[in-house]
Amino acid sequence: MDALTIQEAAETTGWSPRMLRYVERVGLVEPARSAGGYRLYGPAELQRLRTLRELLAEHEIGLSDLAFALRLRNEPELRGATDGWLEAEAERPADVPQSDWLRFEQVKHSKLLAAAALTVTP
Amino acid sequence: MDALTIQEAAETTGWSPRMLRYVERVGLVEPARSAGGYRLYGPAELQRLRTLRELLAEHEIGLSDLAFALRLRNEPELRGATDGWLEAEAERPADVPQSDWLRFEQVKHSKLLAAAALTVTP
DNA sequence: GCAACCTTGACACGACTGTGTCAGGGTTCC
DNA sequence: GGAACCCTGACACAGTCGTGTCAAGGTTGC
C-alpha cells in the first residue's frame, strides 16, 4: 500500500490531521476512503497538499479564496458573471451595458469547461 | 452636477451609506472625491453598484469573493499560481508536474492583462 | 452663517474561517 | 483480541466579514 492514513499524511505534508479534514470539507483535496471509512492519501494528494501550503503562504490568500476560485472553475455561469462585472470598468458609460466581446469571453470559457463534465442547467 | 453624494447614491442603489464606504474599502467601487473630500457617485458608479447587488444576490457569493476575483485579475502571478494548482487535478500522477498547456493558459491570461496597464514585476 | 450633510474612527455584534481539543464509538492489523 | 489508530460531532476561541450606530469634527449651499 502506498496510501497513507491521515496522521501519516499530516506528518509528511505539514498540515495537522484536523486541517486535512477541513481542507477536504472545503473541497480542495478529497482523499479516497478505505472500506471502513478511513481516509487514504496517495502520492497525488500528498503532492497537492504540499503545493497547496506553498500557494497559501506565498501569496496572501486563504483556503476560502481557493474554494471560490474552484467555484469559478466549476460554475461557468458564475465565472461569466464575475468576469463580466470586473471587466466592465468605469470607462463603459451606459451605452453598451454588456456587449459582444464580453459575452464572447464568457462563451469561450463555457466551452472550455463544457469539455470536462458539468452539472449545470437544472 | 450629475454626481450624487453618498446618501443619495445609497437611496438609488439600495446599499446603505455605511456599505458604500465598505465597498470602496475593499476596492470594488471607488467614487471620485470633491475638493473637500466628499464622495461623488457618477452614473457609472451607480450602475456598477446596482449590478454588484444583483451579482452577489444571484450567485451565493460575498464581497470578499469578488475582491479576490479582482486580485486574480490584477496579479497575473497569483492568477497563474491558483489556476495552475486547480488545473492539476488528480489524474496527473507525477510525470508531468506543471506542463505545457497549463503554462499556455497562464501566458495567455498574462498577455490579456498586459494590455491593460499593470503594476507588476518590482 | 447655519442647517444639513459629509468625513474618519471606534465599539458592537452575529456569522463564518481556521485551528485545537475532547468524547464516544468504529477499524486495522499484528 | 487488544493496542493504536481512525471516524464524526461538538465546544472553544481568535480573527475577519458584513453591518449598524455613535462621536467629534469638516463641507456645502442657500
Image (cartoon, coloured by chain):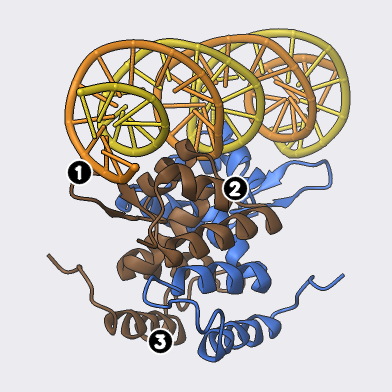
Chain colours: A blue, B brown, C yellow, D orange
As measured in the structure, the alpha-carbon distance from the residue carrying label 1 to the one carrying label 2 is 25 Å
Camera-nearest residue between D16 and A35: D16
Q: Nearer the viewer, mark 3 or mark 1?
A: 1
Question: Is A115 drawn above or below residue A27 in the view shown?
Answer: below
Residue neighbourhood size for the residue with mark 2, other residues' Cα within 10 Å, grouped as few (<14), some (14–19), many (≥20): few
- Residue named by callout 1: B36
* x and y percentages locating residue A61 in the rendered image: 40, 49
Outermost left residue: B122
Q: Which mark is residue B2?
A: none
Q: Is residue A53 left or right of residue A96?
A: left
Q: Chain of mark 1?
A: B
Question: In the image, is B105 to the left or to the right of A74?
Answer: left
Q: Residue at x 53, y 74 (%)?
A: A84
For the question of whether residue A3 can be seen, the reply is yes
Mark 1 or 2, closer to the camera: 1
Quarter of the image with the N terminus of chain A is bottom right
Q: Secondary structure at mark 2?
A: loop
Pointer 3 indicates a residue of which chain? B
Q: Mark 3: which secondary structure?
A: helix
Tell me the amino acid under the disc marked 2: Gly
The reply to the same-chain question for discs 3 and 2 is: yes
Amino acid at the residue labelled 3 = Phe
The quarter in which the C terminus of chain A is drawn is: bottom right
Measure the alpha-carbon separation of dots 3 and 1: 48 Å
Determine which residue is flagged by label 3: B104
Q: Chain of mark 2?
A: B
What's the amino acid at mark 1? Gly
Q: Nearer the viewer, mark 3 or mark 2?
A: 2
Residue designated by label 2: B14
